[in-house]
Amino acid sequence: QVQLVESVGGLGPAGGSLRLSCAASGRTFSSHAMGWFRQAPGKERQFVASISRGGSKTSYADSVKGRFTISRENAKNTVSLQMNSLKPEDTAVYYCAARLAISYFGLWEDVSDYNYWGQGTQVTVSS
């Protein structure tokens, strides 16, 4: 069982930066691949970024590639999302997610691939 708690998101200007963090409970964090997803009002939850259990592999949605960076610190049971060059269309509730990973380098990008979810945190980008 993994419990995930996201940090408070916040409000940022277009072109600015915000950083999200997610703290995981339990002693098996390093056995889980992690992901960030977001959901805007009236839209489905969509993939943002994922990172392998060891942290050496990452993947990104095309809409955030080159602007967002996912990272993790297994010793601290945390995963982060650095968001730069923010755009108004980045406004959404952001969720971190975890799934048990046998593969050390596996990445997953579908909502259905993840078993554990945080409560979500609001990110608002003003134009």
Image: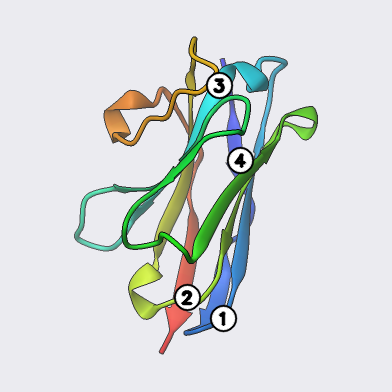
**Where does the image place residue 9, in percent across and percent down from the top left?**
57, 62
Instruction: Give me the C-alpha separation between circle 1 and circle 4.
Output: 24 Å
Badge 4 vs badge 3, beta-carbon distance below 8 Å: no
Q: Earlier in the sequence, mark 1 or mark 4?
A: 4
Q: CA distance from mark 2 to mark 3?
A: 28 Å
Numbered label attached to residue 32: 3
Secondary structure, mark 4, is: strand
Q: Of marks 4 and 2, which one's residue comes earlier in the chain?
A: 4
User: Residue, x 51% and y 38% (percent of image)?
Assistant: 118
Which image quarter holds the C terminus? bottom left
Q: Residues within 10 Å of mark 2 (few under 14, many from 20)?
A: many
Say if 4 sits above or below 71 in the image. above
Q: What is the spatial separation of the Cα atoms under label 4 and label 3, in whole angstroms?
A: 15 Å
Report the residue marked by disc 4.
5
Labels 1 & 2 near each other (Cβ < 8 A)? yes
Gap between marks 3 and 1, in whole Å? Answer: 31 Å
Q: Which residue is mark 2?
A: 86
Q: Secondary structure at mark 2?
A: loop
Which amino acid type corresponds to the residue marked 3 in the rendered image? His
